[in-house]
Amino acid sequence: METAYDILIIGSEISGLISAALLAKKGIRVAIVGDAVKPASYEKNGYIFNERPFPITGLHGGPLGEVLDEIGLSKGVFRNAAISYQVVLPDERVDIYEGTGLFHEELRRCFPQYIDKVSAFYSHTADINGKIDQIMELNPFSFRLLLPYWIARGRKPIKDAIERIDPDQRFQSFISAQLSSFSFMPGGISLIAASSTLESSRKGIYCMEGGSDALRALLMKKIRTLGGDIIEARVKDMSRNGNRWLLRTEDEAFSGRAVIGNIDARTFCNLFLDGGKKYLKKAERIEKACYPLTINIGVKEDGIPAGMAENVVMLRDYKKEYHSDNLLFMQISPSANGRRSLSITCKVSKEEFSLKERLREITEKMLEGVEELCPFIDIHTEVLDIRSPESGWDGIYTTTLSQRMGVGVLPPEIVRGDVVFAGPEVFPTLGFDGLVYSGRMAAAAVLKGLEKGKA
């Protein structure tokens, strides 16, 4: 006996939840089936810590804001600071403002000798970013074939654009810091992907109490309100059953006309009883190249400099060099009972995290960098907790596949028209916005398939 739905979603990460909410809002009978997701936050000695910093972007004028408006969720639960975040260069800090006027003045202060070129660069990236959402709205199965010429030009590396601006690499360092922190993929990033990341972060870096766990809970509550079901059970396999797909768990079976995979691509492909190895070929070329090494610090209020509330701060390492591979990414919580929590992350390569001595060395230098940013923090620290990448549950993706649009890895239709994919592997270079875009695109793809079936 099986329970029938219109759409089945495997996994309850943010992309799949966005797909489910959008579909349920349209009256589609949807069910999310999968194991309970490991919490992104935890408690220790009275402090709530993140597994690693989790910035939310695109709330105003970005893809997340559009989704929240469409499903009827308030933006009031998100918190914003006057200065969303800072990029800390070896010689000064650069404040990132949402408003164009204040941000331009800050750029003029920091890069006066080539402000005209910097302004032209941001004008160009803003123009590209303004068209990305239009491309994402194209037919999800054919948008790669419909790309206009400006998208093809956008594939060129961001490095080419910024090297012409800054002979001493200060501006390049400023841009690379942001791209390294907000992208899920290391290495070279295309101009179009950089445009989306830079513009989305300029629309505000937001946090909410509870971080990604709270966002997931908010979306799940909305899905249930809209009539969707959430079933916590491990999916053993999936197969074709006539004109429907069948998911089996230990105790139950569920069928649907289409499936959205919201789990790791390899795991997703391995679930297929009929030809999974063929589909896995697409996923085998994707791997997690880096892992987050996170230090969580519980500190008394006095240990945080004034004004550093709910800010996201990026800091160069102890060498004070202009490189993005030795970057600290730090997120500070709001005050709670005279306490603050700090989450500080550094990307560690697969080779490094297998070497305990190297991890110890990186950790020590990370702590030196935090003390430089927040002097005397050590005497106010109450809790210090290191989250080793060996237990890291989310890696940083890389791939050898050609990047479609210069922004993505997996096609959303990884398997076939009625089985699509959503998650960080679809648009890894777009960071958090990529999660939202992939969820939207997966929902649009299966909805189109349902409409075609009715016709």
Image (spheres, grey):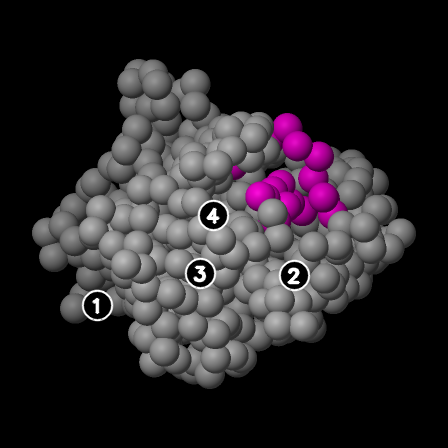
Q: Amino acid at mark 2?
A: Glu
Disc 3, SS:
strand
Residue receiving disc 3: 256
Name the residue type under label 4: Arg
Mark 4 highlights which residue? 240
Q: Residue at the spot x=31%, y=59% of the render?
A: 2
Callout 4 touching callout 3 (CB < 8 Å)? no
- Who comes first in sequence, dot 4 or dot 2? 2
Instruction: Work out whether residue 183 or residue 359 is closer to the camera in this orientation and state it.
Output: 183
Give the vertical position of 350 relative to 183 (above or below).
above
Magenta stretch, overall SS: loop
Please state which of residues 56 and 398 is positioned toward the viewer in this rendering.
398
Q: Which residue is the site of mark 2?
A: 199
Label 1 belongs to which residue? 336
Q: Residues within 10 Å of mark 1 (few under 14, many from 20)?
A: few
**In the image: residue 15, left or right of residue 405:** left
Q: Nearer the viewer, residue 392 or 309?
A: 392
> Residue 413: x percent and y percent?
61, 49
Is label 2 in contact with label 1 (beta carbons under 8 Å)?
no
Q: Disc 2 to disc 1, how far (Cα)?
A: 31 Å
Q: Nearer the viewer, mark 4 or mark 2?
A: 4
Of labels 1 and 4, earlier in sequence is: 4
Counting residues from the start of the chain, the first of labels 4 and 3 encountered is 4
